[in-house]
Amino acid sequence: MTVLGQHLYSTPVVALRELVQNAHDSIVRRRMEDPAVPEQHLIRVEGDLAAGIVRVVDSGAGLTDQEIHRYLATVGVGYTRKLREETQSDELIGMFGLGFLSAFVLASKVTVTTTSWQTPGLGWCYQSSNGEQYTLTPAEPRPVGTVVELVLRDSYRNLGGNGMLAKILRRYCALLHVPVYIGQDDEALNGEAPPWRQAQGAVVEHTVQARRKALAFATRFEERFEPLCTLPISAGPDSDVRGLLWVQDGATYGTSDNRNLSVFVRGMLLDDDARDLLPAWAGFIGGVIESNRLTPTASREDLQRDDAYHAAQSALTEALIDGLAQVARQQPEAWRRVLSRHNEALLGAALCDPRLFDLLAESVRIPTSQGDLSVRSLLDKGRIHINMGSPGGFEDMLFRALHMPVARGDRYAVVPFLREWVSRHGGVLIELGTEHGNRKLFSEDSLPANELDWLNQVLGNGEKLVPARFEPTALPLVVVHDREAELKRRLEADEADKRISVAALQLVRAFTAQLDDSVTRRLYLNLDNPAVTQLLQAYRQGHPQAEEAAGLLQALKVILASGAEQGGQLDLNAALGRVNRIFSLLLSA
Ligand SMILES: Nc1ncnc2c1ncn2[C@@H]1O[C@H](COP(=O)(O)OP(=O)(O)OP(=O)(O)O)[C@@H](O)[C@H]1O
């Protein structure tokens, strides 16, 4: 009893939902069985704060004394399941024969007064303080239906307030098909049907007015964000899921997960955090859905991962992709806001589905050294440059000199997105800092061995010297860090080992084994640069000042590198000293 009553549910408040659900099922039963059934049915939940009492009143089928013994008082057995199996009804909610027990968690005494439609002249009163022992006595007949009265335990007395009851039940019962009234209210808390039930036919019409209604509905459900625009979900052949998704109006980062999905089964809220039904990339999506096919677990707070669940998952992904495409087509202003709020998440999303990629390819923005730009404005003669290092590296310096933006490969999803983009739309992606990328940026050339030796001596600080030709020609030389070698070092560092699992580590090792880290820095010397050509000429002619002039270039290298990164390895003060010395040498000559 303790396990079933107390530990099955995450919160004792669920008991209120269970009682309203029983009232609902009893009304459905009466509609099916009682030929003289009244037109109007209702459920009324009344609280008495001072007395610490809650009453749930229904105009349902009521129970006979036999039924009380057999169904209400027997754990794991319910008339509801029997009826459900006989009629295959989609309306009945209960199935496990357990929910009523949860009342004893909230209440020190439960009294059920009931009159069955089968015996309208008789009343029965069930009473129990623990669900194990109970009494059943005849009572004054009441109008057909049932009153369940809870005398609340001290710790739950606040549930006796009508305001509190309304707050709780508004969430659970928002989509229930029978009106639920609180206290003496004459307006039901679930009076307004959700937008998808109001629409004629299967598909929600997309008029401005319908959109406004849907947005107002979404606003009531989304607690943390303002909904930005809504996306309808209609039932299809594989899944009966219907409802509404919306894009949240709050900035996300690539991996933010604010998915928020409430699932109603047969009109009753089952799970208000069913985020796994939404695709993982939809971190900026909220929604409400309903279905009769999804199967609750016994606690009725989660869903079984069955065929219906997987069908619902696919239906939601489809609705999401179609819905976003529709917003892009029909609501340009909302679409602009979607793009600006969730740019980073959408970059990642685009990689998960080719249709999303098509939708977003031209409109998402790529973070670059010059701010966020569309892929088109990053293209330079069919080439897109991407910095595989962190910002502030030589790549940024080089591209600043070229007046060209370079994409930031250190940001979420940028590298795979750009790779996908060029594979679909053509163009060349130059990944700077990788050997492959460098070869595209610097066309390597050669020099005689003696010249290379001398240059190494006067310009080098342990880098590999590579004679090359590159833009801008005004730049005589640049030190380039090998990003793959850096990555290899980082991945193989001991501290990384501690943070990752053995399996992941094996993968990492397999990957890094392929990376050549024998060269960590290359010094590209620009043979198109006038200073470099003159220097080489001076060396060849045995010019007495050739070494001093080289010293100036070496100083420039150090100064540029210190502005870029890891200048710490080079002596900036010595370089500045050399500039001063050569300066005074020139002027005194
Ligand atoms: N208000 C009510 N009016 C009429 N019958 C009721 C009422 N509440 C409970 N019952 C009867 O008692 C049975 C047991 O109820 P209980 O809440 O324990 O389980 P259930 O609703 O059948 O299933 P679940 O555990 O899935 O909610 C019901 O099947 C129904 O026959």
Image (spheres, rainbow, N blue to C red):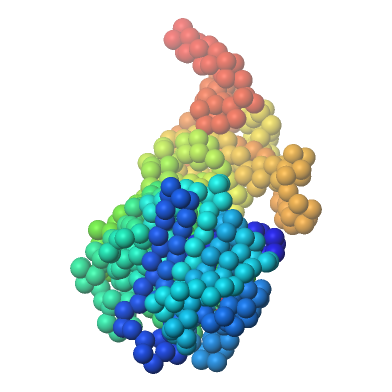
Residue at far top of view:
588
389 is higher (above) or lower (below) than 583: below
In this view, the residue in front, 363 or 131, is 131
Q: Is residue 52 visible?
A: yes
Q: Measured from the top left, where is residue 170 in percent x and y?
A: 39, 60
Q: Which quarter of the picture shows residue 574?
A: top right
Quadrant of the image where one finds ligand 1: bottom right
In this view, the residue in front, 141 or 357, is 141
Q: Measured from the top left, where is residue 88 in percent x and y?
A: 52, 89
Residue 122 in the figure: left or right of residue 457: left
Q: How many labels does the image show?
A: 0
Q: Which residue is at 41% across, 79% downward?
A: 144
In this view, the residue in front, 293 or 232, is 293
Q: Can residue 525 be seen in this view?
A: no
Q: Which residue is at 35% across, 65% downward?
A: 181
540 is higher (above) or lower (below) than 153: above
Q: Measured from the top left, where is residue 163 in percent x and y?
A: 37, 52
Q: Which residue is at 34% across, 53% downward?
A: 226
Q: Measured from the top left, where is residue 191 in percent x and y?
A: 30, 68
In this view, the residue in front, 543 or 319, is 319
Residue 9 in the figure: left or right of residue 334: right
Q: Which residue is at 31% across, 83% downward?
A: 39
512 is higher (above) or lower (below) than 16: above
Q: Which quarter of the picture shows residue 518?
A: top right
